[in-house]
């Protein structure tokens, strides 16, 4: 049942952003609100669960990539483009609406998002040390990457998938810092 609730929530989120009601959700699921509230005490808790589940999956995958035998550049590209299983079913442009209606939840998204950057910084420093990458400021470079990812989310209009837009952006940035032989 929990999985059905999550899937239907994503469908409603894609249509209405975070402005759907628990009543609408229960009607779509053909269950009572009481049953729905047995699983999630509020819409905010339901959205938070989906967010946490997604970020936990991403961070697990990133840890595996970081500890793998891949080269530094490959690890960096893989970590920066790691996706989660529900990614293709979520309209990322709707995420910005969470900021307006659930600012605390949006802050949590931003905090969880920041956690991936520890691996990125370590890989950039390793790459610089091993003459793989060349850049003048790590803080500037990370800010550039974060900005690129944020811009992708805020400019999605359905003409390109989130994954494809992120991959293109990250590949452009990583290609630009690769040290020439």
Image: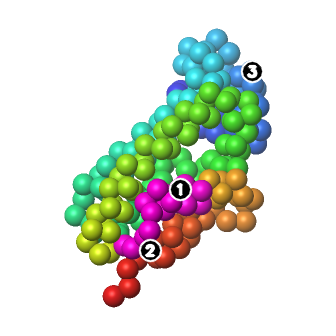
Residue under label 3, please give it.
23
Note whether 1 is above or below 143 in the view shown.
above
Residue under label 2, please give it.
177
Q: Main secondary structure of the magenta part?
A: helix
Closest to the camera, between mark 2 and mark 3, is 2
**Boundaries of the magenta span:** 133-149
Residue under label 1, please give it.
143
Whole-percent x and y of residue 26? 69, 23
Q: Is residue 86 magenta?
A: no
Q: Which quarter of the rendering shows the C terminus? A: bottom left
- Of all residues, the one furthest to the front in this rendering is 136
Of 151 and 163, the residue lying toward us: 151
Which residue appears at 73% of the width and 30% of the height?
Answer: 101
Q: Can see residue 128?
A: yes
- Of all residues, the one furthest to the left in this rendering is 69
Quarter of the rendering containing residue 38: top right
Marks 2 and 3, the one that precedes in the sequence: 3
Local secondary structure at mark 3: helix
The answer to whether residue 160 is left or right of residue 146 is right
Counting every numbered tag in the picture gives: 3
Quarter of the rendering containing residue 157: bottom right
Q: CA distance from mark 2 to mark 3?
A: 51 Å
Marks 3 and 1, the one that precedes in the sequence: 3
Local secondary structure at mark 1: helix
Local secondary structure at mark 2: helix
The answer to whether residue 130 is left or right of residue 14 is left
The answer to whether residue 19 is left or right of residue 7 is right
Q: Can see residue 3?
A: no
Q: Residues within 10 Å of mark 1 (few under 14, many from 20)?
A: few
The answer to whether residue 12 is left or right of residue 141 is right
């Amino acid at each position: 049942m929990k999985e059905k609730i999550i899937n239907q929530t994503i469908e409603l989120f894609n249509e209405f952003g975070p402005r759907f009601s628990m009543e609408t959700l229960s009607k779509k699921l053909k269950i009572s609100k009481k049953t729905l509230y047995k699983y999630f005490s509020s819409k905010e808790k339901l959205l938070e669960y989906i967010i946490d589940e997604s970020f936990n999956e991403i961070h697990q995958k990133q840890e595996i990539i970081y500890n793998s035998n891949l080269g530094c550049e490959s690890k960096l590209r893989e970590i920066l483009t790691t996706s989660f299983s529900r990614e293709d079913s979520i309209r990322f442009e709707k995420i910005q609406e969470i900021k307006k209606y659930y600012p605390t939840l949006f802050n949590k998204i931003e905090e969880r998002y920041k956690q991936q950057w520890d691996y990125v910084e370590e890989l950039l420093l390793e790459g610089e040390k091993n003459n793989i990458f060349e850049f003048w400021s790590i803080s500037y470079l990370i800010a550039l990457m974060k900005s690129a990812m944020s811009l992708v989310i805020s400019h999605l209009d359905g003409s390109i998938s989130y994954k494809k837009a992120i991959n293109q952006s990250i590949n452009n940035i990583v290609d630009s810092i690769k040290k020439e032989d």
